[in-house]
Image (tube, grey):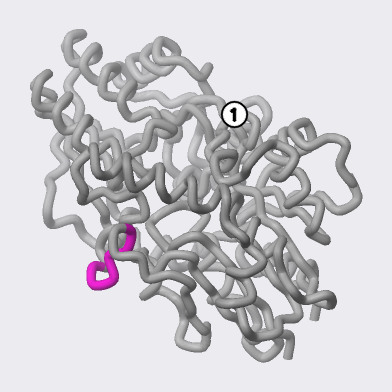
Amino acid sequence: MKKVLFLVHTLQVGGAEKVLVNLVNHMDKEKYDITVMTVVNTGAFRKDLAPHIHYKTIFNVPFLSNKGNTDKSSGNLLDKPNRIKKMLANLYKFMWRHSDCKKIYQRHIKEEYDVEIAFLEGIAAKIIASSKSETSKKISWIHIDLLKERKTEKFFRNAQEEKQCYERFDQIVCVSKNVKEQFIKKFQPVDLNKIMVKYNPIDEEFIMNQAKEGIENIEKKKKTICTVGRLSKQKGYDRLLRIVQKLNEDGLEFDVWIIGVGEEEEKLKKYIKDNRLQNVKLLGYQQNPYKYIKKADFFVCSSITEGFSTVVSEAVILEKKIITTECSGMREILGENGEYGILVENSEEALYKVLKENLMTEDFKIKEEQIKKRKKLFNLEYLTKEIEQLIGV
């Protein structure tokens, strides 16, 4: 049996974290002895790991961790005042930028593994790149466009250190073609033979069963837009609210359901209150977002950047009418020419125009029959076997 370690920063609510739990739960337990380790012991997805998966953590950090609360993710200091939150966050970045990851690895990763996987960029990659094992296979997963979304750079002293980190891996797995292209541009020259694309596997049966549940906390009365994601600047919810305000002024009647938690939550609440957006509901973290997506008329993604959107892929599984800004991975999900959903220019004005057009009509240019065909792209069994082949038997 092959011993495999997956290292991730936290198991907070996010696309990559959901993919990780989904993947390890469905890998062949007769062939793989799997350990999932978090850098910080926090996150709602911890409880979703299958019983045969070993869970370990490196740090129990009081100001980052919400050990007793599995309903929210907290790895971004959500419960602290802004000034304290900023100070602690800067201290945390400084610590990792100047940390000796070889010592951290030696102190906290004491078992020998056949395969060591950094399932997120940044901190997880730094630690696995510092592995003491000379025989283990080392794999790094890249989920984001590292040229547009530069959030991992703050954990490295400089660009050269970040480049050298990824050079220590045997293989680099990118979740979309665009993510791969951007990785190559950022770190060139690179060994192209060790960089590949693997799409995220999605459990269609689980999603479809979850979507059958009824909704008790909210009633659907009008055309409804649903969106799911971390409440961060990257997701563009501030511009979505500005668009909603303009559509309200245009006299359109509709509702918006926003599912998720994050550092922008208080700002979004204030904007909703100040501008009397009574048709917008912030529904917070929902263990089952699929019943809301299924019930809504449209799924909308307003993101400024993405890697390969898990939730848009899940909306395809649910055969929803999808409208999304054009960012990394969207053409791979919805077709190069938008055969399976509507792709709009990544701007506030473009998204406003398309939403207005679709709220004013009953016709959606993408037919359900077309959307159904795209579900095959995320076949759980096929993609999990592909990843098992990569890891080795």
Instruction: Please indicate whether residue 257 sits to the left or right of residue 128 in the image.
Output: left
Q: Is residue 339 magenta?
A: no
Could you say where residue 360 lies in the image, as x and y percent from the top left?
29, 16
Tally of numbered discs: 1
Viewport quadrant of the N terminus = bottom right
Could you say where residue 172 lies in the image, as x and y percent from the top left?
76, 53
Name the residue nearer the viewer: 97 or 58.
Answer: 97
Question: What secondary structure is the magenta-colored segment mainly?
Answer: loop
Q: Is residue 278 above or below residue 167?
A: above
Q: Is residue 82 above or below residue 110?
A: above
Residue beneath disc 1? 148
- Assess disc 1: are there few (<14), some (14-19) or many (≥20) residues with their C-alpha within 10 Å of its C-alpha: some
Q: Is residue 183 above or below residue 195?
A: above
- Which residue is found at the position 62% from the left and 60% from the top? 100
Name the residue nearer the viewer: 367 or 234.
Answer: 234
Name the residue nearer the viewer: 341 or 174.
Answer: 174
- Which residue is found at the position 30% from the left and 21% from the top? 359
Q: Is residue 65 magenta?
A: yes
Residue 301 visible, this orientation: no
Q: Magenta segment, which residues? A: 64-69
